[in-house]
Amino acid sequence: MKQLLVIQKIKVQDANAFASSYSVGFPSIPAFLGSTHKLERILKDKYSELQFNGVGIVSHEFNLKGHRNSKYEKFSVVANRFPLNKKGKSNSFIEEPHCDLTVSLVVEINGITRNEDEFIFDVENCLRSCIKLASGDIISFKKPNLIGLDENDDNEVKRVFKTLMPGYALIERRDLISECMKKDSSSALDTLLSFLEIRSKAEYDDNKNVVWSSSRKESGWLVPISVGYVGISNLGKIKNQRNPEVLHRFAESIITLGEFVMPYRLNKLSDLFWHYYYEEENNLYVCTQDIK
């Protein structure tokens, strides 16, 4: 039996669309898992045995705050206006892309055996007052549900997936990159870009008219996603670090391939969940669906 906390239709305003140092778009996976981790830590003060084991992310609506005059031009960031300084001039700032989105979160939990109504009440209070999602403000959400189900019961799993429709579950497709790199011996970046590029070609039909067609290397709604960080320096302490009690390390973002799919297309419930993973040998701090 699994116990799920389902929070549907969370409407978020001004979330951080700077998913990594390389990409702009749907917020990073660590941003969602970080918010649920904070929720877990707050609730643990009252529910000591509570444990969040995995998080599923389903997107219902996404609106990137950008602008371009035509489809042939690049997007420009629609930046927020900052207050004027004492001299009546605008302060210098780095452009930060934002987005509005609506998502549902499915959290696999343990440790709630009684007072379920009280637990749901506490979750609602935390979402209203203590939690941001991907640095964005939570505007509204449906009342959370606590569901117990048998993962091997297809009917129960389908019933959960049905509550998440219409929407698109974000899943990891790192397997496509791995398989392609083995065949072509290409770099990870070149392989990632090859799945994202759209190839267009023109051909003549029977009437000698020009017909354009577009195709991609792999079918499906494939997107680049940020899943964590890799350490690029040794652990140590530096001046003015945020937490003086924790060792510091410089790190870079890790980008891989993700895919948005309808929840009913998933083979099993576990395909929905993202988990934290730490690999000391390679200095990896990532979120993955591939449980080691």
Image (cartoon, grey):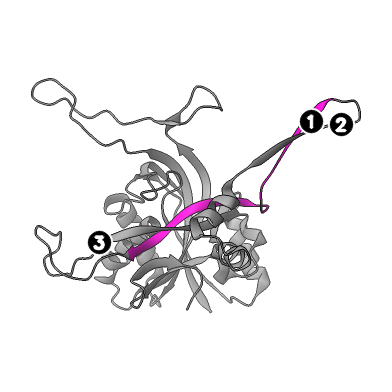
Secondary element under disc 1, as helix, strand or loop, is strand
Q: Amino acid at mark 1?
A: Val
Where's residue 179, x and y in %?
Answer: 61, 67
Neighbor class of circle 1 (other Cα within 10 Å; few <14, some 14-19, many 20+) is few
On the image, numbered disc 3 is attached to which residue? 250
| Residue 8 visible to the viewer | no
Determine whether 88 is above or below 146 in the image: above
| CA distance for labels 2 and 1 | 7 Å
**The residue under label 3 is which amino acid type?**
Phe
The location of residue 220, given as percent across then percent down, is 65, 52
Q: Residue at x 30, y 57 (%)?
A: 126
The type of residue carrying mark 2 is: Asp
Q: Which residues are magenta?
A: 209-230
Query: Distance between the Cα atoms at labels 3 and 2?
Result: 56 Å
State whether residue 91 is above or below residue 281: above
In magenta stretch: residue 171: no
Which of the two residues, 15 or 127, is positioned nearer the viewer here? 15
Numbered tag placed on residue 211 in the rendering: 1
CB under 8 Å between callouts 2 and 1? Answer: yes
Residue in view at x 59 percent, y 51 percent: 194
SS at badge 3: loop
Horizontal side of 139 relative to 242 (left or right) equals right
Residue 268 percent across, percent down from the top left: 62, 70
**Is 149 left or right of 21, judged from the image as shown?**
right
Residue tagged by mark 2?
205
* Among numbered discs 2 and 1, the one appearing first in the sequence: 2
Query: Between marks 3 and 1, how big is the CA–CA gap?
Result: 51 Å
Q: Position of residue 43 (x, y in %)?
A: 29, 67
Who comes first in sequence, dot 3 or dot 1?
1
Front residue of 232/221: it is: 232
| Residue displayed at 34% across by 74% down | 50
Density class for disc 2 (Cα within 10 Å; few <14, some 14-19, many ≥20) is few
